[in-house]
Amino acid sequence: MRTTTSMTSARVTTAGTEGWISGMIGVIIFSGSLPATRLAIAGFSPLFLTSARAVIAAVLGMVLFAAIRQPWPARRDLASLAIVAFGVVIGFPLLSALALQHISSAHSIVFMGLLPPTTALFGVLRGGERPRPAFWLFSGIGALSVMVFALSRGGDGSVVGDLLIVAAIIVCGLGYAEGAALSRRLGGWQVICWALLLTLPVTAGLALATRPAQWTGIGAPAWLGLAYVSLFSMLIGFVFWYRGLALGGIARVGQLQLLQPFFGLTLAGLLLGEPISPTMIAATGLVVLCVAGAKRFG
């Protein structure tokens, strides 16, 4: 009995470690999403960017499905796939692109500190997880530091932009938690690919309707931004992220998103030359410190 218990514990530990590693890779990939979106909207409208990135990723998903002859999902999974599609295929990309017309990517990145507690909350509601009270304390401290930053924001702030990025985070947390729960049955990359294919008729039509009138004036940075959000943010990142959430737990691994502002602010400063204020650094440092505590009590 003791040997069996030890083997089970070892398997759980291994799965948890793999989940954290996979989740960290996903977070690093997602950290480039907002700076890349900022680059892309310099040449494309938010509606076209949202739909085009989904169409490109969906086509790649179809190629993968055709290569391995992936079976169709069960009918009971369609509602969950629709929620995933609403949250991460349509909702977050569109709302964040609209927000970035009013605020800088550096400003919006710090708001990503709200995503871990949001994901954890939906993990409780949709994934049946039950973190300990101390977990919520550390998550709350991280979220509070983000709100303090928002209240003390500088000239790059905008009420409209802030509201849009908060709405984007809410629907994103829902899509993350729903997709993680569903990936335990379907697999991580299969979930995002099915969600992309589910919305393909809508996104393809929207991309055609909102395509630029002229393509020649679009600069290379905008094309690079579109390529990044289509390939990495919309597909590859989810392969690692959903696998990490499924193996390590939605609430626990979701706290890795507290590190996303650190990576994202660095990218925004290096790639876009955006100013990084001391307030941003302080808020980011505090939410990073909350990761260890939230992980311990997740």
Image (cartoon, rainbow, N blue to C red):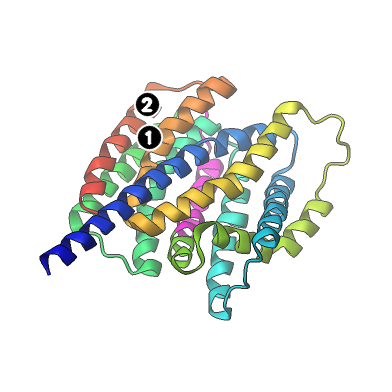
User: What is the magenta range?
Assistant: 156-176
Q: Is residue 99 visible?
A: yes
229, above or below 253, in the image: above
116, above or below 214, in the image: below
Identify the residue position indicated by label 1 in the image.
149
Membership of 175 in magenta stretch:
yes
| Helix, strand or loop under label 1 | helix
* Classed neighbour count for the residue bearing mark 1: other residues with Cα under 10 Å, few (<14), some (14–19), many (≥20): many
Residue 215, located in which quarter of the rendered image?
top right
N-terminal label among 1 and 2: 1
The answer to which of 147 and 248 lies nearer the viewer is 248
- Residue 13: image location, x then y, percent: 26, 53
Tags 1 and 2 touching, CB below 8 Å: no
> In the image, is 263 to the left or to the right of 51?
left
Q: Is residue 101 visible?
A: no
Residue lying furthest front: 3
- Identify which residue is drawn at 82% across, 46% down: 211
- Residue 280: image location, x then y, percent: 40, 28
- Residue 281: which disc? 2
Which amino acid type corresponds to the residue marked 1 in the rendered image?
Phe
Quadrant of the snapshot with the C terminus: bottom left
Which amino acid type corresponds to the residue marked 2 in the rendered image?
Ile
- Residue 129: image location, x then y, percent: 31, 65
